[in-house]
Protein backbone atom coordinates (compact mmCIF):
# COMPACT_ATOMS: atom_id res chain seq x y z
CA UNK A 1 0.00 0.00 0.00
CA UNK A 2 1.40 3.35 -0.98
CA UNK A 3 2.19 5.84 1.78
CA UNK A 4 1.54 8.76 -0.59
CA UNK A 5 -2.08 9.85 -0.18
CA UNK A 6 -4.30 10.93 -3.03
CA UNK A 7 -4.54 14.65 -2.27
CA UNK A 8 -7.82 15.11 -4.15
CA UNK A 9 -9.50 12.42 -2.04
CA UNK A 10 -7.69 13.50 1.11
CA UNK A 11 -9.16 17.01 0.86
CA UNK A 12 -12.62 15.91 -0.30
CA UNK A 13 -15.22 17.52 1.99
CA UNK A 14 -17.81 15.57 3.90
CA UNK A 15 -21.45 16.05 2.94
CA UNK A 16 -22.71 16.58 6.49
CA UNK A 17 -21.24 17.49 9.86
CA UNK A 18 -21.71 16.81 13.54
CA UNK A 19 -23.11 19.19 16.13
CA UNK A 20 -22.34 20.11 19.73
CA UNK A 21 -19.33 18.51 21.40
CA UNK A 22 -18.91 16.05 18.51
CA UNK A 23 -18.45 19.01 16.14
CA UNK A 24 -15.78 20.47 18.42
CA UNK A 25 -13.95 17.13 18.33
CA UNK A 26 -14.29 16.94 14.53
CA UNK A 27 -12.80 20.43 14.15
CA UNK A 28 -9.77 19.32 16.17
CA UNK A 29 -9.40 15.85 14.65
CA UNK A 30 -9.82 16.80 10.98
CA UNK A 31 -6.60 18.83 10.53
CA UNK A 32 -4.56 16.40 12.65
CA UNK A 33 -5.72 13.46 10.55
CA UNK A 34 -5.16 15.32 7.30
CA UNK A 35 -1.54 16.04 8.25
CA UNK A 36 -1.05 12.32 8.90
CA UNK A 37 -2.59 11.34 5.54
CA UNK A 38 -5.96 10.15 6.86
CA UNK A 39 -9.56 11.33 6.46
CA UNK A 40 -12.14 11.86 9.16
CA UNK A 41 -15.28 9.84 8.53
CA UNK A 42 -17.45 10.55 11.56
CA UNK A 43 -17.35 11.53 15.22
CA UNK A 44 -19.91 10.02 17.56
CA UNK A 45 -20.29 10.74 21.26
CA UNK A 46 -22.25 8.02 23.09
CA UNK A 47 -23.49 8.99 26.53
CA UNK A 48 -24.25 6.35 29.12
CA UNK A 49 -22.61 4.59 32.03
CA UNK A 50 -19.31 5.22 30.25
CA UNK A 51 -19.12 8.06 27.73
CA UNK A 52 -17.52 6.77 24.53
CA UNK A 53 -15.96 9.10 21.98
CA UNK A 54 -15.76 7.18 18.71
CA UNK A 55 -13.73 8.67 15.86
CA UNK A 56 -14.00 6.85 12.52
CA UNK A 57 -10.94 7.25 10.32
CA UNK A 58 -9.76 5.95 6.96
CA UNK A 59 -7.03 6.32 4.37
CA UNK A 60 -8.12 8.10 1.17
CA UNK A 61 -8.65 4.69 -0.47
CA UNK A 62 -11.03 3.64 2.30
CA UNK A 63 -8.67 1.25 4.08
CA UNK A 64 -7.28 1.25 7.63
CA UNK A 65 -4.98 -1.03 9.59
CA UNK A 66 -4.38 -1.68 13.29
CA UNK A 67 -1.07 0.19 13.00
CA UNK A 68 -2.95 3.14 11.48
CA UNK A 69 -5.29 3.19 14.48
CA UNK A 70 -2.37 3.26 16.90
CA UNK A 71 -0.71 6.06 14.96
CA UNK A 72 -3.90 8.12 14.91
CA UNK A 73 -4.57 7.51 18.60
CA UNK A 74 -1.09 8.67 19.60
CA UNK A 75 -1.51 11.87 17.59
CA UNK A 76 -5.10 12.69 18.58
CA UNK A 77 -4.88 12.01 22.32
CA UNK A 78 -2.58 14.97 23.11
CA UNK A 79 -4.58 17.31 20.86
CA UNK A 80 -7.85 16.39 22.57
CA UNK A 81 -6.26 16.71 26.01
CA UNK A 82 -5.04 20.22 25.25
CA UNK A 83 -8.26 21.58 23.71
CA UNK A 84 -10.54 19.57 26.02
CA UNK A 85 -13.70 19.59 23.81
CA UNK A 86 -15.51 16.92 25.90
CA UNK A 87 -15.97 18.04 29.49
CA UNK A 88 -17.03 14.73 31.02
CA UNK A 89 -14.82 11.66 31.45
CA UNK A 90 -14.81 9.56 28.29
CA UNK A 91 -13.26 6.59 26.54
CA UNK A 92 -11.64 7.29 23.16
CA UNK A 93 -12.03 4.73 20.40
CA UNK A 94 -10.40 5.04 16.98
CA UNK A 95 -12.01 2.75 14.42
CA UNK A 96 -12.40 2.04 10.74
CA UNK A 97 -15.81 2.76 9.18
CA UNK A 98 -16.47 -0.99 8.93
CA UNK A 99 -17.96 -2.92 6.02
CA UNK A 100 -21.47 -1.44 6.45
CA UNK A 101 -19.87 1.99 6.49
CA UNK A 102 -21.41 5.45 6.64
CA UNK A 103 -21.54 7.25 3.29
CA UNK A 104 -20.22 10.73 4.03
CA UNK A 105 -18.51 11.86 0.81
CA UNK A 106 -19.32 11.86 -2.89
CA UNK A 107 -16.60 9.26 -3.49
CA UNK A 108 -18.32 6.96 -0.96
CA UNK A 109 -21.46 6.95 -3.12
CA UNK A 110 -19.40 6.29 -6.27
CA UNK A 111 -17.83 3.24 -4.62
CA UNK A 112 -21.24 2.13 -3.32
CA UNK A 113 -22.93 1.85 -6.73
CA UNK A 114 -24.67 -1.53 -6.91
CA UNK A 115 -24.85 -1.94 -3.13
CA UNK A 116 -27.79 -1.87 -0.73
CA UNK A 117 -28.04 1.21 1.48
CA UNK A 118 -30.20 3.22 3.84
CA UNK A 119 -30.41 6.95 3.14
CA UNK A 120 -32.08 9.72 5.12
CA UNK A 121 -32.58 13.21 3.69
CA UNK A 122 -32.89 16.62 5.31
CA UNK A 123 -36.01 17.45 3.29
CA UNK A 124 -38.96 15.50 1.95
CA UNK A 125 -38.31 13.78 -1.38
CA UNK A 126 -41.50 12.41 -2.92
CA UNK A 127 -43.18 12.70 0.45
CA UNK A 128 -40.63 10.95 2.65
CA UNK A 129 -37.18 11.31 4.19
CA UNK A 130 -36.08 7.70 4.73
CA UNK A 131 -35.19 5.33 1.89
CA UNK A 132 -33.95 1.75 1.75
CA UNK A 133 -32.81 0.00 -1.40
CA UNK A 134 -30.02 -0.18 -4.00
CA UNK A 135 -27.76 2.59 -5.27
CA UNK A 136 -28.02 2.17 -9.05
CA UNK A 137 -25.76 5.02 -10.15
CA UNK A 138 -24.52 8.50 -9.38
CA UNK A 139 -25.68 11.05 -11.94
CA UNK A 140 -23.07 13.83 -12.05
CA UNK A 141 -24.14 15.40 -15.36
CA UNK A 142 -26.13 18.25 -13.81
CA UNK A 143 -25.25 21.06 -11.41
CA UNK A 144 -26.12 18.84 -8.41
CA UNK A 145 -25.07 15.16 -8.24
CA UNK A 146 -28.07 12.82 -7.94
CA UNK A 147 -28.15 9.39 -6.34
CA UNK A 148 -30.26 7.14 -8.57
CA UNK A 149 -31.87 4.81 -6.05
CA UNK A 150 -34.17 1.79 -6.44
CA UNK A 151 -36.25 1.42 -3.32
CA UNK A 152 -36.97 -1.90 -1.64
CA UNK A 153 -39.37 -0.33 0.88
CA UNK A 154 -42.08 0.92 -1.47
CA UNK A 155 -45.76 0.81 -0.62
CA UNK A 156 -48.60 0.56 -3.16
CA UNK A 157 -48.71 3.70 -5.29
CA UNK A 158 -45.15 4.84 -4.42
CA UNK A 159 -42.38 5.35 -6.97
CA UNK A 160 -39.76 2.60 -6.95
CA UNK A 161 -36.92 4.63 -8.51
CA UNK A 162 -36.03 8.00 -7.00
CA UNK A 163 -33.27 10.53 -7.56
CA UNK A 164 -31.87 11.95 -4.33
CA UNK A 165 -29.78 15.14 -4.48
CA UNK A 166 -26.50 14.46 -2.71
CA UNK A 167 -26.72 17.81 -0.95
CA UNK A 168 -29.99 16.75 0.69
CA UNK A 169 -28.51 13.62 2.29
CA UNK A 170 -28.51 13.82 6.10
CA UNK A 171 -27.33 10.26 6.69
CA UNK A 172 -26.34 7.32 4.53
CA UNK A 173 -25.06 3.85 5.36
CA UNK A 174 -24.40 0.62 3.49
CA UNK A 175 -26.45 -2.42 4.47
CA UNK A 176 -24.46 -5.54 5.31
CA UNK A 177 -25.18 -8.12 2.62
CA UNK A 178 -23.38 -11.17 1.24
CA UNK A 179 -22.57 -9.24 -1.94
CA UNK A 180 -21.08 -6.35 0.05
CA UNK A 181 -18.91 -8.77 2.03
CA UNK A 182 -17.70 -10.48 -1.16
CA UNK A 183 -16.94 -7.15 -2.83
CA UNK A 184 -15.07 -5.91 0.26
CA UNK A 185 -12.95 -9.06 0.40
CA UNK A 186 -12.18 -8.81 -3.33
CA UNK A 187 -11.11 -5.17 -2.96
CA UNK A 188 -8.97 -5.95 0.09
CA UNK A 189 -7.25 -8.82 -1.74
CA UNK A 190 -6.58 -6.62 -4.78
CA UNK A 191 -5.14 -3.89 -2.56
CA UNK A 192 -2.82 -6.37 -0.82
CA UNK A 193 -1.65 -7.80 -4.14
CA UNK A 194 -1.03 -4.33 -5.57
CA UNK A 195 1.04 -3.45 -2.50
CA UNK A 196 2.94 -6.77 -2.59
CA UNK A 197 1.63 -7.78 0.84
CA UNK A 198 1.01 -11.38 1.92
CA UNK A 199 -2.45 -12.85 2.35
CA UNK A 200 -4.12 -11.99 5.65
CA UNK A 201 -4.50 -14.98 7.99
CA UNK A 202 -8.04 -16.16 8.60
CA UNK A 203 -9.95 -14.93 11.64
CA UNK A 204 -7.65 -11.93 12.11
CA UNK A 205 -10.17 -10.24 14.40
CA UNK A 206 -10.29 -13.21 16.76
CA UNK A 207 -6.51 -13.53 16.71
CA UNK A 208 -5.96 -9.97 17.92
CA UNK A 209 -4.90 -9.68 21.59
CA UNK A 210 -7.93 -8.88 23.73
CA UNK A 211 -6.44 -5.76 25.38
CA UNK A 212 -5.80 -4.17 21.98
CA UNK A 213 -9.43 -4.06 20.80
CA UNK A 214 -12.18 -3.18 23.28
CA UNK A 215 -15.16 -5.51 23.07
CA UNK A 216 -17.54 -2.55 22.61
CA UNK A 217 -15.48 -0.90 19.88
CA UNK A 218 -17.27 -0.68 16.49
CA UNK A 219 -15.55 -1.49 13.22
CA UNK A 220 -12.71 -3.92 12.72
CA UNK A 221 -10.14 -1.78 14.44
CA UNK A 222 -10.29 0.30 17.61
CA UNK A 223 -7.70 2.14 19.67
CA UNK A 224 -6.99 0.97 23.19
CA UNK A 225 -7.27 4.33 24.96
CA UNK A 226 -8.82 3.87 28.37
CA UNK A 227 -11.28 6.14 30.13
CA UNK A 228 -10.02 9.70 30.22
CA UNK A 229 -10.67 11.00 33.73
CA UNK A 230 -10.95 14.60 34.85
CA UNK A 231 -8.77 16.38 35.80
CA UNK A 232 -6.87 15.77 32.57
CA UNK A 233 -4.24 13.11 32.44
CA UNK A 234 -0.91 14.15 30.84
CA UNK A 235 -1.09 14.35 27.01
CA UNK A 236 -0.76 10.91 25.46
CA UNK A 237 -0.89 9.08 28.77
CA UNK A 238 -3.31 6.21 29.24
CA UNK A 239 -4.96 5.24 32.46
CA UNK A 240 -4.45 1.53 33.30
CA UNK A 241 -7.51 -0.69 33.03
Image (cartoon, rainbow, N blue to C red):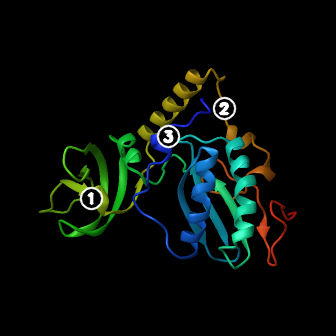
The answer for how far apart the CA atoms under marks 3 and 2 are is 33 Å
The answer, for residue 172, to whether it is visible in the render is yes
What residue is shown with label 2?
202
Closest to the observer, 163 or 213: 163
Res. 163 mark = none
Which of pointers 1 and 3 lies earlier in the amino acid sequence? 3
In the displayed image of the protein, which residue is found farthest to the left?
Answer: 157
Which is nearer the eye, 215 or 137?
137
Where does the image place residue 164, in percent across and percent down from the top left? Answer: 24, 57
Give left or right: position of 222 versus 8. right
Mark before the other along the chain sequence, 3 or 2: 3
**Local secondary structure at mark 2:** loop
Quadrant for the N terminus in the image? top right
Instruction: Looking at the image, tell me whether mark 1 or mark 2 is earlier in sequence order.
Output: 1
Please name the residue that numbered disc 1 is placed on. Answer: 153
SS at mark 3? helix
Q: CA distance from mark 1 to mark 3?
A: 38 Å
Kindly report which numbered mark, 3 or 2, lies closer to the viewer in this rendering.
3
Q: Secondary structure at mark 1?
A: loop
Residue 6 higher or lower than 36, as above or below: above
The percent coordinates of residue 118 (x first, y second) are 36, 57
> x%, y% of residue 14?
44, 56
Foreground: disc 1 or disc 3: 3
Residue at 15% across, 62% down = 158
Pinpoint residue 102: horizontal percent, then vertical percent. Answer: 46, 54
- Please tell me which residue is depicted at 79% across the width and 45% down the height of the picture: 209
190 vs 29: above or below: above
Residue of label 3: 7
Amino acid sequence: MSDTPNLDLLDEPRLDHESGQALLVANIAGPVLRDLGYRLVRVKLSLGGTTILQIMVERPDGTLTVDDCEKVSEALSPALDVDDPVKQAYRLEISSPGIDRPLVRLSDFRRAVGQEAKIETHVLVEGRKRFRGRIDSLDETGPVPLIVFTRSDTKPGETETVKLPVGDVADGRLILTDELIRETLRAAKAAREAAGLPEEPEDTDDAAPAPEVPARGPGRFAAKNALKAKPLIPPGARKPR
